[in-house]
Image: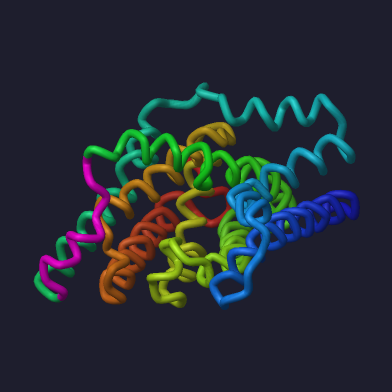
Amino acid sequence: MSERIRKNLLLFFCIAFIWSWGLWLPKVLLNFGIECLDIWLYLSDFAVFGPLIAAIIVTYIRLGKNQLRLLLIKGIRTNFRTIWLIPAIFLMPLFALLSFLLIIPIEGLYILNNALPWQLLMSFTLEIFLLGGPLGEEYGWRGFALVRLEFKWNALISSLILGLVIALWQLPLYFIQGTIQQYITIFPNIVIVILSSIIYTWLYNNTDKSVLITMILHLSTIVASAIFPYWSSTVGSWIFCGCIFTSAIIILWKYGIKNLKSE
């Protein structure tokens, strides 16, 4: 990794964290009984765009308009085999469903009360895509950061580093009322975020670095978690974590740690 790439990566992470944590702060303070102006609470909804904003700023200032255009094109790139849409759409929902079904005998049917009503599915999906993470995060995490991490480390190490960074970036969400993170056990979720980064890298590297495929995976993960709220139980979170771990091991065994990519 050259000095220029290292500085660009560090600048990206700094901007992403400052933007997101700064905008999340009013809601964190509110959770502890400290009132803030309504405008600041409204602006908190845009905190999730920190990685996207950081990627755009660093790319434009340090690399130029042409590189920014190439970055944005990754979000609409569809020149990959359609078979990769299968894991992107169905893998995480399968794990969520399995985890959810396994905890029903343990926790009881009351956990169904946490499930998203089916009539809200379409509006929820659209809202999550635009405001809930896929659009605001994936251009930054995968489109900008992952590519540069892989200049120095193999795909496995790069995935784990990025997963840890994302897990740290999400920490304020555990202290904001109304987020899923507020209701789940923090440790298994951190492990899930770190391990699932391997799956994101696997899809990203096998689709000619398409940010679109990672946005689809991100979206399917959140929607599945809403429909099948395995996170209602710590046991469910650990089962889901086990599914992610097993799939990551299979991917590493089949594709290798260097590129996580079929040769």
Residue 36 lies in quadrant: bottom right
Q: Is residue 153 above or below residue 216?
A: below
- Residue 250 lies, in percent from the top left, at 36, 57
Left or right of 253 on screen, residue 24? right
Q: Is residue 256 visible?
A: yes
Q: For the point 45% across and 51% down, which residue is it?
A: 199
56 up-or-down from 19: above or below? above
Q: Residue at x 73, y 55 (%)?
A: 19
Q: Which residue: 50% across, 46% down?
A: 132
Does 46 sit above or below residue 114?
Answer: above
Q: Nearer the viewer, residue 243 or 36?
A: 36
Q: Which residues are magenta?
A: 107-118
Q: How is the image coloured?
A: rainbow
Q: Is residue 113 left or right of residue 23?
A: left
| Residue 95 % position (x, y) | 28, 55
Reply yes or no: does residue 194 show up in magenta.
Answer: no
Residue 263 appears in the rendering: no
> Chief secondary structure of the magenta span?
helix
Q: How many callouts does the rendering have? A: 0
